[in-house]
Image (cartoon, rainbow, N blue to C red):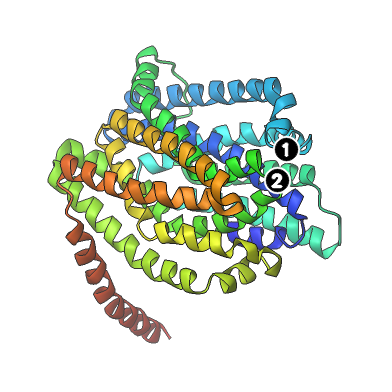
Amino acid sequence: MGLINFMLLIRQLTKAQMSVWALFLIITTIFETTKSGLLKGAHIKYVSSTDNHIEKVLIGSSSLLINILITVLFIVVLFLVSNNLGVWLHTGPDLVMMLEYYIPGLFFMVLFSHLEATQQSHFDFKGVFAGYFIRQLIFFLFIVFDTFMKAPFSLVKLAIYQSISTGVGTLIIYFYTRKYLHHKFKYSKTGTKKLLSFGGYLFGSGVVSNIFLNLDQLMTAAFLSPVSVAYYNAASRINQFIDIPTYSASEILFPKVSRASSLEGMEKVKYLFERMAGILLSFTIPVSVFIILFPKLVITVIAGSAYLVAAPILQLNMLTGVFRPMQNQAANVLNSIGKTGLSFLINLIFLVSNLGIDYLCLSYFGFYGAAIGSLITMSAASLIWYAVLKKQIGFEPKNLFVNLLNFYKSVPPMVSGFISSLKKTS
């Protein structure tokens, strides 16, 4: 749904508007995902590891309180830097206005993210799917309605639509999650310290890794024209679509690995990582190869012919996209086995390196410099992650391809069984 919404909007907004919209999504996404890194991981780990009713209430209450306080702090900071934000990113007042109109959505996200963590801590993902799907569906309906009625699009209107969609999505996820809620609030100083001590490095890692992932767009906005962000964003959104299985797998893998590291040891953690990463590679390798071979076709279908300039950016991103699932899962595994400090340090090194490399590449290569810089950094990152995982969990790369081939072999029987079941039903 997010991809469909993007395909509709990119054909309705000017490149300047699309750049501001992209930066709005980057800022709000970085905030939500880093906040999630602080709270959700710890929430899931501690709730999924205990059957004690009181302990679950204390962890849930502390998580919700921290969630609210961080959101309020973000809004305060937003108002403090609002005069400078548009100047730094060359967006004028549009970006700040969008963020201000999205404030109700930020408060809806407090509840949404809390309910999401509660669902996942009970290994239930139906409500998470329903909540995200309805959020995107409502936003899609708003866009379709305005398109059909030929109503003019405005950035402020899109921010309001985002807030409303998030509110409706929160109601949906609450419907699915209420059976796990105790509807009690019991503040615990110990529970709060427990969450913060575990999630502190996760928070730092979240901030660093999310800035790292969006650094090409942020630096392009700061050092080149803001319109350039629209081209980078077109390539980035296609990357995000390819990465959806990776992030979905992370949501499932984190509680499983957390439990395995506590009860079954590193051999089980190694098995889970290698199997999940191998299956993800079975998807990303063929898709990435196709996009590298036919970038203009993909850009034209998704973003339109006006964005063909972004085709080389997409190719450069896809070169590292083949093995990006392994890197994403590697950080996830380190966090779930308690090596959050190490994960933070590695991500910080990557960010600082990418800052320097992107700056040099932008100065030397110009428009495509940020994409070239990201390719260099991500390639080096793959080697570092391999060394770290080999030491921490005994990772063996050959097992990735064994799992990949086994998955491919299992597809025909699965398809055959599915067709047979359909025939029996009919």
Q: Residue furthest front?
A: 364
The location of residue 47, given as percent across then percent down, is 33, 32
Which of the pair 299/67 is nearer the observer? 299
Answer whether residue 174 is visible to the viewer in this image. yes
Left or right: where 205 falls relative to 405: right
Which of the pair 198/116 is nearer the observer? 198
Instruction: Choose mark 2 or mark 1, whichever is in front.
Output: 2
The location of residue 374, given as percent across then percent down, is 46, 48
Q: Residue furthest top?
A: 189
Task: Name the residue rendered at 26%, 34% in the picture.
Answer: 49
Displayed quadrant of residue 422: bottom left
The location of residue 418, given as percent across then percent down, is 35, 78
Task: Name the residue rendered at 51%, 42% in the picture.
Answer: 360
Please name the residue that numbered disc 2 is placed on: 225
Can you say whether 155 is above or below 145 in the image? above
Please name the residue that numbered disc 1 is placed on: 90
Left or right: where 151 falls relative to 353: right
| Residue kind at label 1, given as amino acid type | His
Left or right: where 344 falls relative to 24: left
| Residue kind at label 2, given as amino acid type | Ser
Q: Are marks 2 and 1 in contact (CB under 8 Å)?
A: yes
Q: Which mark is residue 251?
A: none
Q: Count numbered badges in the picture.
A: 2
